[in-house]
């Protein structure tokens, strides 16, 4: 064993500068081991899947607004098996619904928030030259890619893609078509990708942080990614186990999740039986509740960075935010069965899980409150990233607070599986997390490209998205409280009680399509600014954290000289200082 | 580009990157097998009747396999210890032994599987067999994976010994940690499936 060689800061390897120039196109941009290239690959993949998943939803919104009407113009493209005469079949609606959820969560938000921002920003923010395991990092991206291809491919198998919801509840999923098998195989790829990524993030954060960067000097974003990685590491394997068991049920004919004597279409199934259908739900939600925090924590991290930077103030209550975050991560493992109050699992279980659910709301509120108080007395710069970050606060607030009635057993019973639930979690994830991710794109774009994104287009994008998001999801609270089930492919046309809410579906659908229009300025801006954006130096936002000391875009190996942290992450407006920010990486 | 602390230890954590990585990986593996064991418990307590393992499965054969795997863990430690003492040839012998013992385990497992399949005992027959095939199958895949990594260090990967012996020793140690974990899973599987 070589003895300790001291905390040598990561050395820049000048000799390798010449070496990496020799890398060909494939090794440099496609099979790259550079965390920044991989981060951008993740981010672009995530953005494309977000757009695709959004497209599935735009189709579904047609049938919800105008049930049974033929879809004009593009209705004929989907074939008679899915949309005969342009009218959507319920099976196709189920396919769209299941794949919308799967794609948005596992192929859209997670790759962008964890794979994209985590890979690109985290090593830069801790002053590391790369991730701890660059080759594993590359493998983890390509596992995601294979998973994505598998999911997309499942649309073309006989019977189409998975139709049993993103939750794949058994026994429905056990007896579903071939698409479900593809879904399971795709998930195993995605789980492998996340596990490898999580190992890399945790090791990198612990080992490769710059000299002087103690844990309590971490930017909040680093903490958020660190806790997220633990959630992925420990929550995903049980779903992998469950996926293997469901695969066995489907392929080898076992009965892990199958009861005895199940009657399907008038036929009694001949499987051995004796399985436990609730077991699937327990294993699924053991992952999927922590997964909710995987979706939101990186967003909170991004918002914290941007708020500190644009209020020109330190974050209020940094320590309590960090402690809340760690507590939140821990608690997220023992709240899962609040998704299962309606399954008849028993009052003792329900009492336990509603108690833990109420407890977990406390750290979330602490973080949100700290972020809101941070605004107090700041001279706020209202640039595009800040607008998105500011919008995150009330949107996440609405989403979070409307979750409380769902976390209590009694109030959950009338609201369960209605549109209220959809409104609740979309407020957290869509105008919540996705706004935070967009904020992050606008904020770190100059680091990745050396150029700013256009502010005017950015503001159009922001205002349009903000209005449309609320147009889409606010009506769903009304529809849900009227008791309309979220599973109905025609929005409840057959039910009298649903009639007074039907017009809200039209509002929501037009909001969806308008939201798509307002993404055009963003897409244009994203590509246009790569070549035409205003050129900026390495620290255009006058920020304090270490990533802004690297050149923009950072070269392979990131830093010109190994950075060192001299102080906490948010030393803005220090009284008596020469400028209104004192970077973490500058010796005083 | 060289990543810091790949070989040398970081002073404030006292660890190299690979050591943290492998322990994190093992933590996720604990959750994987933990979920499967939990499922086993839930399905078994919900079943009206459950066969005792030894009425269906071959206990002496599994005992042999237990001994084989424990022996392979011993040779794995010896392989690493040989490298620590800079005896590369001894390492080769012990590492080869570890791989061979893994192979013996899988061959025994193969005969066990074919025997049950010939008797018409399939995964779909009942939930005892379902969990038996799933757990031992997944464990077998882990044995195979561990053997593949060990074979790499025995064969082509051993080149690293000439250029960076400390790094090579660390990698063998990390591979050994995984191997012991696979062994440990079997030590839980054996009584759970065969004896209880």
Image (cartoon, rainbow, N blue to C red):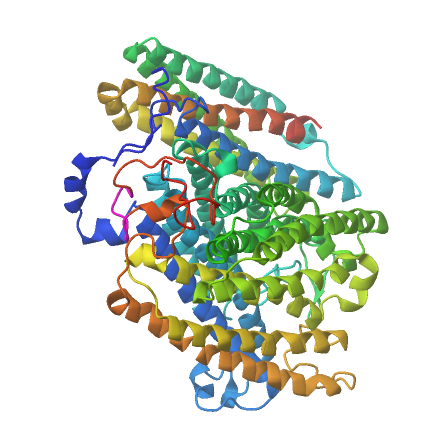
Residue occupying image coordinates x 71% and y 78%: A479
The answer to whether residue A298 is left or right of residue A551 is right
- Image coordinates of residue A41 in percent, x first then y, are 34, 56
Name the foreground residue: A28 vs B111.
A28
- Image coordinates of residue B9 in percent, x first then y, are 38, 22
Residue occupying image coordinates x 55% and y 39%: B118
Dominant SS in magenta: loop
The answer to whether residue A245 is left or right of residue B46 is left
The answer to whether residue B143 is left or right of residue A257 is left
Q: Which residues fall within the magenta stretch?
A: A551-558
The picture quadrant where one finds residue A340 is: bottom right
Name the foreground residue: A536 vs A42.
A536
Q: Is residue A190 above or below residue A513?
A: above
Q: Is A553 one of the magenta-colored residues?
A: yes
Q: Is residue A269 above or below residue A202?
A: below
The picture quadrant where one finds residue A529 is: bottom left
Residue occupying image coordinates x 43% and y 27%: B19
The picture quadrant where one finds residue A14 is: top left
Q: Which quadrant holds the C terminus of chain A?
A: top left
């Amino acid at each position: 064993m070589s003895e300790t060689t001291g905390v040598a800061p990561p050395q820049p390897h000048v000799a390798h500068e010449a070496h990496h120039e020799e890398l060909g196109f494939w090794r440099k941009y496609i099979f790259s081991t550079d965390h920044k290239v991989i981060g951008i690959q993740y981010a672009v993949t995530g953005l494309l899947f977000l757009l695709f998943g959004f497209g599935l939803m735009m189709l579904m919104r047609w049938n919800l607004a105008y049930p049974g009407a033929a879809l004009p113009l593009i209705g004929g493209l989907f074939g008679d098996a899915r949309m005969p005469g342009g009218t959507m079949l319920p099976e196709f609606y189920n396919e769209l619904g299941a794949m919308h959820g799967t794609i948005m969560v596992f192929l859209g938000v997670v790759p962008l928030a964890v794979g994209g921002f985590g890979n690109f920003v985290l090593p830069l923010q801790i002053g590391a030259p790369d991730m701890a395991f660059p080759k594993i990092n590359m493998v983890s991206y390509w596992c995601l890619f294979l998973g994505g291809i598998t999911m997309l491919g499942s649309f073309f198998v006989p019977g189409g893609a998975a139709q049993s919801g993103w939750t794949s509840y058994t026994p429905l999923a056990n007896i579903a078509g071939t698409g479900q098998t593809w879904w399971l195989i795709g998930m195993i790829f995605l789980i492998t990708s996340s596990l490898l990524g999580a190992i890399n993030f945790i090791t990198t954060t612990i080992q490769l942080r710059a000299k002087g960067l103690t844990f309590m000097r971490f930017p909040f974003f680093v903490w958020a990614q660190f806790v997220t990685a633990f959630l992925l590491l420990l929550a995903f394997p049980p779903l992998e186990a469950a996926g293997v068991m469901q695969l066995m049920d489907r392929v080898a004919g076992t009965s892990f999740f199958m009861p005895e004597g199940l009657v399907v279409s008038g036929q009694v199934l001949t499987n051995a039986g004796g399985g436990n259908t609730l077991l699937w739900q327990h294993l699924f939600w053991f992952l999927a509740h922590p997964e909710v925090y995987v979706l939101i924590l990186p967003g909170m991290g991004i918002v914290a960075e941007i708020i500190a930077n644009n209020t020109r103030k330190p974050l209020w209550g940094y320590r309590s935010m960090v402690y809340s975050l760690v507590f939140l991560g821990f608690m997220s493992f023992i709240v899962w069965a609040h998704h299962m109050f309606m399954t008849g699992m028993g009052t003792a279980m329900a009492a336990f899980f509603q108690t833990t659910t109420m407890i977990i709301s406390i750290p979330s509120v602490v973080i949100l409150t700290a972020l809101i108080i941070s605004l107090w007395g700041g001279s706020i710069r209202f640039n595009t990233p800040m607008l998105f970050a500011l919008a995150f606060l009330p949107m996440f607030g609405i989403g979070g607070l409307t979750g409380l009635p769902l976390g209590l057993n009694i109030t959950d019973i009338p609201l369960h599986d209605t549109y209220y639930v959809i409104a609740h979690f979309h407020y957290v994830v869509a105008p919540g997390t996705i706004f935070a991710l967009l904020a992050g794109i606008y904020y770190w774009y100059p680091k990745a490209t050396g150029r700013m994104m256009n502010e005017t287009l950015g503001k159009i994008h922001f205002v349009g998205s903000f209005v449309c998001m609320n147009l889409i999801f606010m009506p769903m609270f009304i529809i849900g409280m009227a008791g309309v089930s979220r599973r109905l492919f025609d929005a409840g046309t057959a039910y009298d009680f649903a009639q007074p809410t039907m017009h809200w579906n039209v509002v929501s659908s037009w909001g969806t399509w308008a939201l798509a229009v307002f993404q055009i300025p963003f897409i244009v801006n994203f590509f246009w600014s790569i070549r035409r954006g205003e050129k900026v130096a390495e620290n255009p936002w006058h920020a304090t954290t270490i990533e802004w000391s690297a050149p923009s875009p950072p070269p392979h190996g990131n830093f010109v000289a190994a950075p060192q942290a001299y102080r906490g992450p948010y030393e803005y407006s220090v009284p008596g200082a020469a400028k209104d920010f004192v970077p973490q990486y500058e010796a005083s | 580009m060289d990543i810091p602390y790949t070989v040398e230890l970081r002073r404030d954590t006292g660890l190299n990157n690979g050591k943290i990585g492998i322990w994190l990986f093992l933590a996720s593996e604990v959750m994987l097998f933990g979920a499967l064991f939990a499922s086993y418990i839930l399905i078994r307590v919900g079943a009206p009747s459950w066969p005792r393992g030894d009425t269906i499965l071959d206990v002496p054969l599994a005992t042999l396999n237990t001994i084989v795997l424990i022996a392979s863990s011993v040779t794995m430690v010896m392989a690493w210890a040989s490298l620590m003492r800079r005896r590369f040839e001894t390492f080769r012998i012990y590492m080869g032994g570890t791989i061979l013992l893994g192979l013996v385990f899988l061959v025994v497992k193969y005969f066990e599987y074919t025997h049950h399949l010939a008797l018409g005992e399939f995964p779909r027959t009942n939930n005892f067999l379902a969990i038996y095939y799933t757990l031992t199958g997944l464990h077998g895949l882990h044995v195979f994976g561990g053997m593949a990594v060990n074979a790499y260090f025995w064969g082509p990967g051993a080149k690293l010994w000439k250029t960076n012996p400390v790094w090579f020793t660390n990698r063998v140690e990390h591979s050994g940690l995984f191997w012991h974990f696979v062994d440990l899973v079997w030590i839980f599987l054996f009584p759970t499936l065969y004896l209880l």
